[in-house]
Image (cartoon, rainbow, N blue to C red):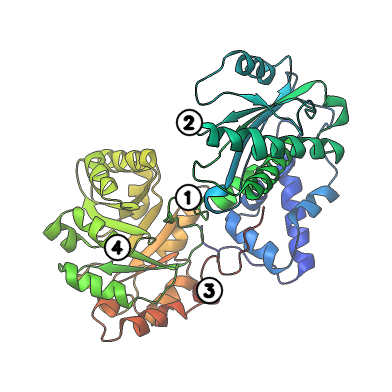
Amino acid sequence: MSVIDVKKPSTKEEIIKAVLQAAQKETGTKNKPTKPTIIGTAKEMDIHRDTLYSWLKEFNVNFKEIVNCMPTQNNKNEEFSGPTYLIGESLLGEGTEVAHVDLMIGDKNGPVGQAFAIGMANLSAGHTPLLAVIRPNLPPKPHTLIVPKVTVKNMEDTGKIFGPAQAAVAKAVADAAEEGIIPTAKLDEWVIIASVFIHPQATDYRKIYQYNYGATKMALQRALIKYPSLDKIIYDKDRAKHPIMGFKVPRLWRPPYLQIALDAPSLESAKKVIEQLPGSDRIILEVGTPLIKRYGTRVINEIREIAKDKFIIADLKTLDVGKVEVDLAYEDTADAVVAAGLAPAETLDATVQEARRLGTYAVIDMLNVDDVLAKLKSIKDFPDIVILHRGIDQETGRSSGLERIKRIRDTFPNKKFLIAVAGGIVPETAKEALEKGADILIVGRYVTQSKDVERSVREFLELTPSMREDVDLYRVHTE
């Protein structure tokens, strides 16, 4: 969704008023008591959730504080009728002493209690469960069962589990009880199962203790507050980078973006262009149709080697066998696949459905499609990106068809999608496109044939304040 469609509040008071009204409207439309969410509130304001996040941040407004000021419709005494069953997780530390704790906490007469009893009675070679104890003969409450994640192969491994890890988990549970994190009334009614990771090469007992203490306590805190919230998950899922994977899975969550079309059928030329691009996560790459026709989809893998964290689009311009072509591009690590808008509705449906199944983006290029609205209405599943495109042979150097952006958004107000514009895009026409609501600027020869690629790219990145900033420039990772 474009960030230009709805007028931005100019003061803190205005945004508080707008958010409060939208939040009340959201909860008023629900059939059961509920609290407003950022997602639902943004929808009522007719803006994307990320736009609301950025507005709240800019005006230093706390969404939770606004919600707490509302007359609540929640019945606080309404609890889940079954046994308590809570889950927490935490990773803490670094090096081989890093701690990763997964835990369950709940009633003795529920599924957690049953699992606790089974774990105590059924020992497994190399993964023998043990009770957490602060010292021999002094367990904490709730009673806690530790299950080693990594196979215990020798007495050295055993010493780490039965020493610093056992003590750390027990002390964390005891401190959580003392601090009120675990309700006092539940100390004899609940049990805890903690799955603990100890690296075979860990040697520093003090770090093993410290990290496992912190991870256990954090996991308990998270379990008791049912962390994470849906808002947290949705906000972070497209921004997060798993520390062990070693690469980032990029997602297009905060437009606008600049898409560089690598159309020349030369891999070496494409690599030279990529090497000269400035370091900006506003840049996404398109492996053009001529490049794919010459080298096949395997060229995506070769480009990935020098653009590891970039969002890469495979411009297949699929006209038939949509599922098959999505699979081909997916296997070669494409983040998005382009189908031709001229394809039959059945092919476009197959393309979108398969892309959704695999977690890639489905893109429809409306090159030579006379009635874009009719084509979009003819398909069952909406694409992630719609490209409004003039072909190279049709370009005149002037912008054309940008008025269709608003018509598309007005026709499909409840769909979540991005609009890209392509064909003769230069900085002058790009500015007009952004003003009319374009989310992605697709640029080819202006950049790829430039004598100074970096300078040409920066001409586009300087068009708006948001494009000048990297997406996560001001984000601090906190939990």
Check disc 1 and report its element: helix, strand or loop: loop
Mark 3 or 2, nearer chain start: 2
For the residues labelled 1 and 3, the Cα–Cα distance comes to: 29 Å
Q: Amino acid at mark 3?
A: Glu
Residue at mark 3: 469
Mark 3 or 4, nearer chain start: 4
Label 1 environment density (alpha carbons within 10 Å; few <14, some 14–19, many ≥20): some
- Residue at image position (73%, 14%) is 109
Label 3 environment density (alpha carbons within 10 Å; few <14, some 14–19, many ≥20): some
Mark 2 or 4, nearer chain start: 2
- Residue at image position (23%, 70%) is 270
Mark 4 or 1, nearer chain start: 4
Tell me: 428 left or right of 37.
left
Residue at mark 4: 286
Q: Are marks 2 and 1 in contact (CB under 8 Å)?
A: no
Tell me: 157 left or right of 456.
right
